[in-house]
């Protein structure tokens, strides 16, 4: 996984901060909506999901359908969460393996996860993403102006 420290850089958009793994998890635990990327018929597809950051994994709930069918054929996924405010933007991307939660005790724990119920579906299927890599960036929105405003 990534290094243990944050470091700063600069881009035309303003200062860029490469986030440490710990900082990425802190941000992931603040949010609950992300995008799951997987291969469907050998083409990349994105699916919005509500999630919970549990320890060092991502948990989401779904129902039988396209996501589950394709995860069975290829469990390699990417998962992205971002946020944009007036002061900053950040993005965290996880690459890893997704697996359906089948253990009865793990399902009982997953049932208590803070996942919203948008559509009543039975049965729920829980999927856990175990990261092989995690990376993140924070962009500070700063306007760089010349010191001598009279010469604009």
Image (spheres, rainbow, N blue to C red):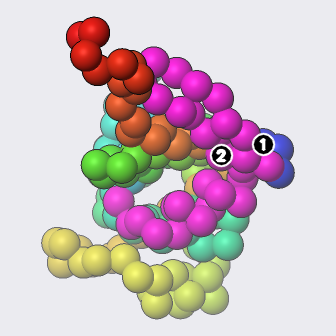
The image shows residue 13, relative to residue 71, as above or below, that is above
Q: Residues within 10 Å of mark 1 (few under 14, many from 20)?
A: some
Closer to the eye: label 2 or 1: 2
Q: Residue furthest top?
A: 151
Asked whether 141 or 91 is in front, the reply is 141
Q: What range is drawn magenta here?
A: 5-33
Asked if 41 appears above or below 16 in the picture, the reply is above
Sequence order check: which comes first, mark 2 or mark 1? 1
Q: Which residue occupies 67% across, 36% down? A: 8
Residue 99 is one of the magenta-drawn residues: no
The residue wearing badge 1 is 2
Q: Is residue 54 above or below residue 14?
A: below
For the point 39% across and 39% down, the residue is 141
Q: Secondary structure at mark 1?
A: loop
User: Marks 2 and 1: CB-CB under 8 Å?
Assistant: yes
Q: Nearer the viewer, residue 32 or 74?
A: 32
Q: Measured from the top left, where is residue 105 in percent x and y?
A: 63, 88
Farthest residue toward the left?
119
Q: Is residue 21 visible?
A: yes
User: In the image, what residue occupies the spot 78% across and 42% down?
Assistant: 2
- The dot on residue 19 is 2
């Amino acid at each position: 996984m990534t290094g243990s420290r944050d470091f700063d850089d600069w881009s035309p958009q303003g200062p860029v901060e490469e986030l440490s793994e710990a900082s990425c998890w802190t941000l992931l635990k603040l949010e609950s909506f992300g995008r799951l990327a997987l291969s469907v018929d050998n083409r990349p597809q994105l699916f919005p999901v509500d999630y919970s950051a549990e320890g060092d994994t991502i948990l989401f709930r779904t129902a039988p359908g396209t996501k589950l069918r394709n995860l069975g054929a290829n469990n390699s996924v990417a998962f992205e969460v971002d946020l944009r405010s007036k002061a900053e933007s950040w993005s965290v991307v996880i690459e890893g393996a997704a697996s359906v939660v089948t253990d009865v005790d793990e399902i009982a724990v997953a049932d208590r996860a803070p996942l919203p119920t948008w559509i009543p579906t039975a049965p729920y299927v829980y999927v856990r993403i175990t990261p092989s890599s995690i990376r993140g960036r924070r962009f500070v929105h700063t306007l760089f102006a010349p010191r001598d405003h009279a010469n604009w």
